[in-house]
Image: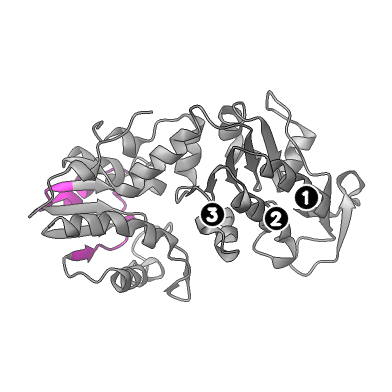
């Protein structure tokens, strides 16, 4: 796999740097609800500061505003970052998507970002699948380098596309097959076992567009309606009452999936097994998280719900790599070129 040149090789002493970080974090009542991505951005910033960078401007998008919107201001994120890394050389710019030129890869906006900077460091792996001004445009105007997070993401995810320790178990969940179909086709064909939960399991049971078999749930937590407090029963999948919904994998499936995961030499897990945000339908996702965390395997985990489950169970440190990139990770594993990586010269 092609690797972009690393910021490790850049001469940063006395230079002004523009760093594209991924600070797209969830907010709750105006405060950062989960700072995983902020913390993941720190090693690159710490590295260039320690090596004598004169100034570091950090830019990122936050959410999907249609223009300037106080609800999407970067201010709460900046406050959290300054608490974690108090250095007066750091300046955190306002939400890049407040400018319509960002998503259009507008040259004028890219020039505005690049102005008065000497180098560009791309560290926002979660955004490099987008051709935006802050991911591609500015990299064409300044000498561009990959940050430490981007470098590690490409390396660790790339291992799944090469020779792996077997058995290779792929675990996929979520609501829509089409969101994961590219990964399932490209990576699933390399796997020895593919386990599928969530609503996408129902879709694959009805019609499997994949050229290989997948392991689907044998039982589910059935709910009378799509509601957090709905009446529930554990039923065999084939006995799901008419009009009821399977909102989580059942205990038999949890055990079967855990047993298969325990045998793995390599694991990739992306997506919840049920409606994880509702505690009564979170047990399947938690069971997979525990199995992946406890496995003696090279394990890569992606997706917000999967990552959240690992953190809540205290298993974050027990996986080999916890990816910060949702769509970017999936596109890389589909075999697609990532524009924000391709624009950086090779190492």
Residue segment shown in magenta: 90-119
Mark 3 vs mark 1: which is more N-terminal?
A: 1
Residue in the foreground of this view, choosing between 219 and 204? 219
Q: Is residue 105 magenta?
A: yes
Q: Which residue is mark 2?
A: 287
Q: CA distance from mark 1 to mark 2?
A: 8 Å
- Which labelled disc corresponds to residue 329? none
Percent coordinates x, y for residue 54 in the rendering? 10, 59
Mark 1 vs mark 2: which is more N-terminal?
A: 1
The residue depicted at 37 percent of the width and 44 percent of the height is 152
Mark 2 vs mark 3: which is more N-terminal?
A: 2
In the image, residue 262 above or below residue 206: below
- Furthest toward the left, the residue is 14
The residue depicted at 74 percent of the width and 67 percent of the height is 228
Check the picture and name the quadrant holding the N terminus.
Answer: top left
The residue depicted at 78 percent of the width and 45 percent of the height is 256
């Amino acid at each position: 796999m092609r690797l972009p040149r690393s910021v490790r090789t850049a001469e940063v002493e006395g230079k002004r740097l523009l760093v594209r970080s991924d600070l797209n974090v969830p907010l709750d009542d105006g405060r950062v609800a989960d700072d995983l991505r902020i913390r993941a951005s720190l090693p690159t910033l710490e590295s260039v500061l320690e090596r004598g960078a004169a100034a570091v401007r950090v830019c990122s998008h936050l959410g999907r505003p249609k223009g300037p919107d106080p609800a999407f201001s970067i201010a709460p994120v900046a406050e959290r970052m300054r608490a974690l890394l108090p250095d007066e050389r750091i300046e955190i710019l306002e939400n890049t998507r407040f400018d319509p030129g960002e998503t259009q890869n507008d040259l004028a906006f890219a020039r505005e970002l690049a102005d008065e900077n000497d180098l560009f460091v791309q560290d926002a792996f979660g955004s490099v699948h987008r051709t935006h001004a802050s991911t591609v445009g500015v990299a064409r105007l300044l000498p561009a380098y990959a940050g430490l997070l981007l470098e590690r993401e490409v390396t660790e995810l790339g291992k799944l596309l090469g020779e792996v320790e077997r058995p290779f178990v792929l675990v996929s969940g979520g609501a829509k097959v089409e969101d994961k179909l590219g990964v399932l086709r490209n990576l699933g064909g390399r796997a020895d076992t593919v386990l599928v939960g969530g609503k996408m399991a129902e879709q694959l049971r009805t019609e499997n567009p994949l050229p290989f078999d997948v392991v689907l749930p044998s039982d589910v937590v059935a709910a009378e309606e799509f509601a957090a407090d709905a009446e529930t029963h554990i039923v065999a999948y084939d006995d799901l009452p008419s009009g009821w919904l399977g909102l989580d994998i059942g205990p038999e499936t949890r055990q079967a999936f855990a047993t298969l995961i325990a045998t793995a030499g390599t694991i990739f897990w992306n997506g919840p097994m049920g409606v994880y945000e509702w505690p009564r339908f979170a047990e399947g996702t938690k069971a997979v998280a525990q199995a992946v965390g406890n496995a003696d395997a090279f394990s890569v985990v992606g997706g917000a719900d999967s990552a959240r489950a690992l953190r809540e169970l205290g298993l974050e440190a027990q996986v080999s790599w916890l990816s910060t990139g949702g769509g970017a990770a999936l596109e890389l594993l589909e075999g697609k070129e990532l524009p924000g990586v391709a624009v950086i010269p090779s190492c």
